[in-house]
Amino acid sequence: MKNGAWILAATILGSSLAFIDGTVVNVALPALQTALHATVSDVQWVVESYALLLASLLLVGGSLGDLYGRRKVFVCGVILFAAASIWCGTVSSIDRLIFARAIQGIGAALLVPGSLALISASFPADARGRAIGTWSGFTAITAAIGPVLGGWLVEHASWRWVFFINAPIAAVALALTLWKVPESRHNNISRVLDWQGALLATVGLGAVTFALIEAPKRGAAAGVVGLAGIVALAAFIVVESRSPSPMLSLQLFRSRNFSGANLLTFFLYAALGGIFFFVPLNLIQVQHYTPTQAGGALLPLILIIFLLSRWSGGLIARYGARTPLTAGPLIAALGYFLLLIPGIGGEYWRTIFPGIAVLGLGMAVCIAPLTTAVMSAVSQNQAGVASGVNNAVSRVAGLLAVAVFGLVLYATFSRALDHRIGFLSLPRAEVQQVNRQRPNLAAIESDDPRVMLAVGESFMVGYRTILWLAVALSLASAVAARWLLDPAEKAP
């Protein structure tokens, strides 16, 4: 089609801002923790503040694009994201960084659904799967460059540069979009936006996330906040069911394929998002990789997704959605299992690489078919909302998983550390020093090598526990695909 390559280039670069940000920032977290004197819960909020606003407002972003023009909203998102990225790189405290990351999340909520919606609106049905596969693959390869470059910048310059690298990418994406991408919108939808729903979703998700992250420090108070969040989310469902122009159209879920694909998305991306928050902490703080090595360690996963995504984009036409969406999560589950086997030390190619490579294969098999299945389950006029729903589901999954996995890891780490410290016969002052640093997890510092070994081993106990959770979630994804996706359901 006319300008098809330019449209793909613009949307790939724009959406890559959000994908690069996730992988790059994770590699920078240990450096952030040291430079800004932050606890693990603080660096969780660096990730979660971004994910919270992104997840909560993705549906609004999709609706804004359908209503006012997908290109226009996409451009606004790119500009806001770039400005917030520069702000992130100049902050002097962890609190300001968390706030700037939230602004980044708002920008991402505008550009992420817009990228897929522009593709769906610009390509005919018979070419859409391949186009989405190309988008998935090239988005993955741009994300692959991020961790390696980001790790090198953290190691040789400053963690601040992991945010500054977004600016030139945004400039190119903006220029291509304004030059070559046509405008599109949905002319038959309500002109009223569901801000009440957006507010309830943000408050509900924020409160639940706060409760999960802050539970070790705040106890019952965090539980009360979490309960308020659950009430807000319940109110969100009620409001959406009664709203004449809902942010989340519950009618979309009447499609069995749309519902099944989004449940699969939730399980699959909960595992991925939850684990990949903690992988760099393990690699840098426990395995003693440099930031550059940690970024490079993840490269095979993203390269495999890139190399196979265009191929996997055609699987749904040949086999239907159910087969690749059952096989992919099963392969991913094997990858997580392989990652939980190694202990401390060992050569990368024997310890980390096998699990990363198998996980990459599993994700490559299902990412493009999953996206195509979601977008094919709705009419073209609902492309923006459908894209927003699916992206929101994946982001909410990662948001909650980072919080839940962190809570589980902290609990298992603490029990294991108590057990190991008890055998060391340490002076009382040393025990107190370790306990004060306990919220730092593997970043605990001590001059006693026995303590440092106990910290590393205790972290690995918690790390393996959350990897088992990832295995279970991936298996649940495969079950959802096998039993909920209906090959006989016709697209609207």
Image (cartoon, rainbow, N blue to C red):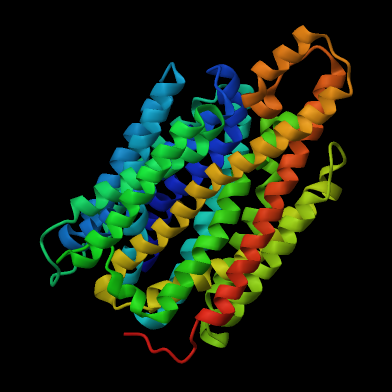
Residue most toward the front?
A: 220
Q: In the image, what residue occupies the spot 70% across and 21% down?
A: 444
Which quadrant of the structure image shows residue 422?
Answer: top right
Residue 271, horizontal then vertical, whole percent = 60, 55
Along the horizontal axis of the image, is 367 left or right of 91?
A: right
Q: Residue at x 54, y 27 (%)?
A: 217
Q: Is residue 299 visible?
A: yes
Q: Is residue 408 above or below residue 269?
A: above
* 175 and 167: which is toward the camera: 167
**Residue at 18%, 69% in the rendered image:** 186
Percent x, y of residue 386:
34, 67
Can you say whether 470 is above or below 87 in the image? below
Q: Position of residue 198 (x, y in %)?
A: 26, 51
**Most foreground residue, 42 or 4:** 42
Horizontal side of 319 relative to 164 (left or right) equals right
**Would you say 451 lies left or right of 272 here?**
right
- The quadrant the C terminus occupies is bottom left
- Count of numbered marks: 0
Q: x%, y% of residue 448?
A: 84, 14
Placement of the N terminus among the 4 image quadrants: bottom left
Residue appearing at x 83%, y 9% in the figure: 427
Q: Quadrant of residue 354?
A: bottom right
Q: In the rendered image, is residue 288 in sight?
A: no
- Outermost residue to the bottom: 488
In the foreground, 231 or 77 = 231
Is 462 drawn above or below residue 183 in the view shown? above
Q: Nearer the viewer, residue 459 or 154?
A: 459
